[in-house]
Image (cartoon, rainbow, N blue to C red):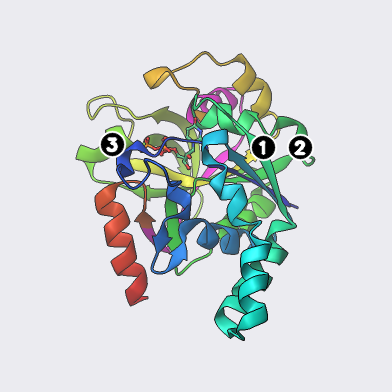
Amino acid sequence: MIKQAIIPLAGLGTRLLPLTSIFPKELLPINGVPGIEYIIDECIEAGIKEIIFIISKKKNLIKKYFYQDKIYKDFLAKKKNPRVNNHYKKILKNRKMIKFVYQNKPLGTGDAVLKAYKFIKDKYFLMLLPDDLIFKENCSKAMIKIHKKFNSSVMASMSVDKDSVSRWGIYKFKKKLSKTDYLISDVVEKPNKKNAPSNKAVIGRYILPKSIFSKLLALKPGKSGEIHITDAIRLLINQNEKFIAHNFSGKYLDCGTMSGYIKSNLEISKL
Ligand code: UTP
């Protein structure tokens, strides 16, 4: 069973400046809802019981968002407002399952995940990158099903334009397991077009084995001086850990760039 999820939230969000100069990008509204709430909903629906948020001192507003009881209580004492009341109830319920862990220097997604090391109990856990929203299919739920079937690690994937491979982790597969699932033989973080092993990209949903922590500990900083989760995954694949790519059928929205963020608002309002 996959019961725990790690969500790295400690990055600087520079691509969304000026919106992120003081405000964490994960709290920015997407169609009237802070983006992080879509991710929490996805986790809960997929059966996750504990979520570990990796935040930083600079992004303490994320923690505060879940602990504003006085504001809600004062307002609800004066006014009966079902919308706000329901939302407050949801926050009270959700915060019980969230643990806050700190990464005060943004040294990469791999380094962020490493901060949760001592809290992970089972052999596998889920990891979600909150910039990547997927609608119309609960991608985490579908991946947990695949994990159960193959007893393997799983990553979400989609085909991308050949000219954009340098933005993603790109994988090579050795076997097609079904219409949507591939057995991975290698993965490279942000390759240039010439060296890319394919145009199949890894998207921000991962089911990872606990053994990834020892690989992360041993890694030296890679591209742009950061510890990338992809580099640790590559080491595990080289040691024959089974990784399956799941080509999800849902609608993917990239909320980490300004154009993607604006587009996401419009797209979600149409769903
Ligand atoms: P990104 O690299 O896409 O986001 O990380 P970023 O660094 O926040 O934004 P830009 O590139 O400056 O615009 C993907 C996710 O991993 C988290 C980020 O918060 C984001 O949710 N992250 C990234 C960390 O938690 N720690 C890091 O050191 C880096």
Query: Which badge, 2 or 3, comes first in the chain's sequence?
Result: 2
Looking at the image, the residue that sits furthest to the left is: 163
Residue 4 x/y as whole percent? 71, 48
What residue sits right under mark 2 in the picture? Answer: 119
Number of the front mark, 2 or 1: 1
The residue type indicated by label 2 comes to Phe
Kindly identify which numbered label has been placed on residue 165: 3
Number of the front mark, 2 or 3: 2
Towards the viewer: 267 or 160: 267
Number of the front mark, 1 or 3: 1
Towards the viewer: 185 or 187: 187
Mark 2, secondary structure of its residue: helix
As for residue 248 lying within the magenta part, the answer is: yes
Query: Which badge, 2 or 1, comes first in the chain's sequence?
Result: 1
Residue 220 versus residue 22 in the image, above or below? above
Kindly identify which numbered label has been placed on residue 101: 1
**Quadrant where the C terminus lies?**
bottom left
Looking at the image, the residue that sits furthest to the right is: 121
Residue 57 x/y as whole percent? 57, 34
Q: Which residues are magenta?
A: 230-252
| Label 1, residues with CA under 10 Å away: few <14, some 14-19, many ≥20 | many
The residue type indicated by label 1 comes to Val
Mark 3 CB near ligand 1 (8 Å cut): no
Query: Which badge, 1 or 3, comes first in the chain's sequence?
Result: 1
87 on left or right of 227: right
Residue 66 x/y as whole percent? 63, 57
Residue beneath the point at 67% across and 64% down: 70
